[in-house]
Amino acid sequence: MTDSSVKAIAKVMDSVGDSAYVVVALIVLMALYAMLTQKNLLKVSIAISVMCSSVNMFLVLLGYRAGGNIPIHFLKGDESALMVLPTPQCLTLTAIVIGLATTALMLSLIVMLRKHYGTLDIDEIRRLRG
Amino acid sequence: MRKTVFMAAIIVLAGLFCGLFEEIHPFGIPASTAMDDYFIVHAPEDRSSHNVVTSMVFDYRGFDTIGEASVLFTALSSIAALFRNKDARGEGDGGRRG
């Protein structure tokens, strides 16, 4: 990564401003709407994954510092340059892996449901309602 | 009908989110940076890693990573239990496989 491209990315990020939070909120709301209204279980699981990603995005956005570089020390330039916060990125890495595990479990449960009921439509899977 | 009700609920939730934007710190100015500044300054000599995120994932917050690995292992075991071949149980080997 060259110095100029780092500066260009920082410039774009600084011009984004608070609308970054608005974008994350929009993605959360869209995923929630899809989760509530879709009938196909696969589409519901896609909505859950989108919401997971938007939460990860929000965590990384919380740790952004205006004009900051990535937190790696052998970039060109002065070593004391401003860096974005590393803690939210570290926790986001953990959250990505846990989201992967939950998605895998969710999809395998959907496969089992398809085997038992022969359909993915949640209105036709009624035996759970007692 | 159902979709209209959910749409109304989503719009109400969007209003609540707009209220939250007043509370959150402005984009690009984190609320508290003392811990992260310590990590950024001390990671190269403490943990011999130029990448601060790597030194946090594997050293400063290593227990976190152990928990993450255990979550992965639990999910894998659950998937293996779900897709177990039930017909193979107890056929000629005294049920040792099952």
Image (cartoon, grey):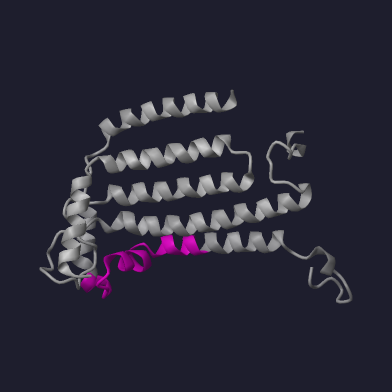
Magenta-highlighted residues: B44-69
Q: Percent position (x, y) of residue A89?
A: 33, 57
Q: Percent position (x, y) of residue B96?
A: 81, 73
Up the image or down, A8 lies above or below B25; here it is below
Left or right: where A103 falls relative to B63:
right
- Magenta: main secondary structure: helix
Q: Residue at x 55, y 54 (%)?
A: A102
Q: Percent position (x, y) of residue A80?
A: 12, 64
Q: Residue at x 56, y 35 (%)?
A: A36
Residue B29 seen in the figure? no
Up the image or down, B78 lies above or below B18; here it is below
Left or right: where A81 falls relative to A85:
left
Q: Residue at x 76, y 53 (%)?
A: A115
Up the image or down, A44 lies above or below B22; here it is below
The mark tally for this picture is 0
Left or right: where B91 falls relative to A65:
right
Left or right: where A85 falls relative to B95:
left
Q: Percent position (x, y) of residue B3?
A: 56, 28
Q: Quadrant of the C terminus of chain A?
A: top right
Residue A81 seen in the figure? yes
Which residue extends farthest left?
A78
> Splitting the image into 4 quarters, where does residue A105 fall?
bottom right
| The magenta stretch spans residue A69 | no
Q: Residue at x 73, y 34 (%)?
A: A129
Q: Quadrant of the N terminus of chain A?
A: bottom left
